[in-house]
Image (cartoon, rainbow, N blue to C red):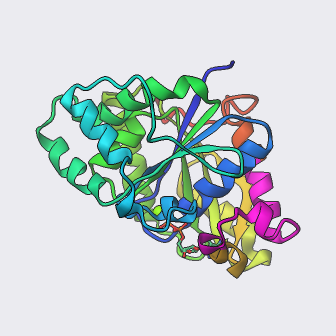
Amino acid sequence: MAKTKVIAVANQKGGVGKSTSVYCIGAGLAAEGKKVLLVDVDPQGDLTKMLGQRKPHELPLTLGNVMDGIVAGTAFKEHPEIMRHSEGFDFVPANRSLSAVEVGLVNVMSRETVLRQYLDSVKQDYDYVLLDCRPSLGMLVINALSASDYVLIPVQADYLAAEDMTELIGTVQSIKRQINPKLKVGGVFLTMSNETKFRREIVQTVRTSFGQHLPVLNAVIPSTVRLAEISIADKSIFLHDPKGRAADAYRRLTKEVLDIGEKQRSRSSDLGK
Ligand code: ADP
Ligand code: MG
């Protein structure tokens, strides 16, 4: 099997479609025959809920427990925390206990790489591991970026905040410099876009604002209630509204994600090394 690609979906802004995108890209990759693991790295547990676990706080085993285990030096041979989703991928759920883990990391040695150590023990079974980040640039996001080959950045089309992007890219650069030299920006993509006719312009703005070295993906995710509905439908967009615009857009985005690190090798940002 080819080497596993670990991809963090990150933006410190909340409500830009990170969790929805992790779910839909994950389901899209699984539909393409890839072996996929989704990891909820947000104590809110939004992804966990979307994947059908409505009461994350009642789950006996979550990412919080396994990260605690890594910190305590416990070695796991089996991985009962990994759950199976009916759409053909696996996931590791999260709940509020992950917040305590994040706070506790401050005093831990190698605190930036606890998640990487965990993923190193499970990722060999997968083609893709997608990490759903919490909306911050705190220690959990640093852990996600330290564990990743690529970061995908969803940007809300109508609220393009250049300062937020600069801050996020700065974090990516410093993690690349200090902890994880292989980290690259796999792409920026637009979510929740309302104006079809302005898309080209918005994509252009993203390109000019964030530098020619930052790859901007072509797929633009429309703003549609069909996507808002999937968080309670227990189905990805591909089953909920397979013929709709949103499913089309996520299909195209999935294809672009498949290209990351393949023929787009030269397009992925090196961030000036
Ligand atoms: P984040 O993980 O960045 O906080 P979510 O994926 O949880 O963002 O999305 C925030 C809210 O917007 C959720 O209620 C979700 O169902 C909804 N949503 C996500 N993507 C879209 C979209 N393209 N169009 C409309 N609503 C969306
Ligand atoms: Mg989220």
Residue 243 lies, with reference to residue 9, above or below; the image says below
Taking 220 as reference, is 99 left or right? left
Looking at the rendering, the stretch of residues picked out in magenta corresponds to: 230-254
Q: Main secondary structure of the magenta part?
A: helix
Q: Is residue 248 magenta?
A: yes
Taking 136 as reference, is 128 left or right? right
Instruction: Report which quarter residue 172 is drawn in.
Output: top left
Residue 117 locus on image (x, y percent): 36, 27
The N terminus lies in quadrant: top right
Q: Residue at x 30, y 33 (%)?
A: 114
Q: Residue at x 40, y 22 (%)?
A: 77
Residue 142 lies, with reference to residue 228, above or below; the image says above
Taking 209 as reference, is 241 left or right? right
Residue 186 locus on image (x, y percent): 59, 41
Q: Residue furthest top?
A: 1
Taking 180 as reference, is 36 left or right? right
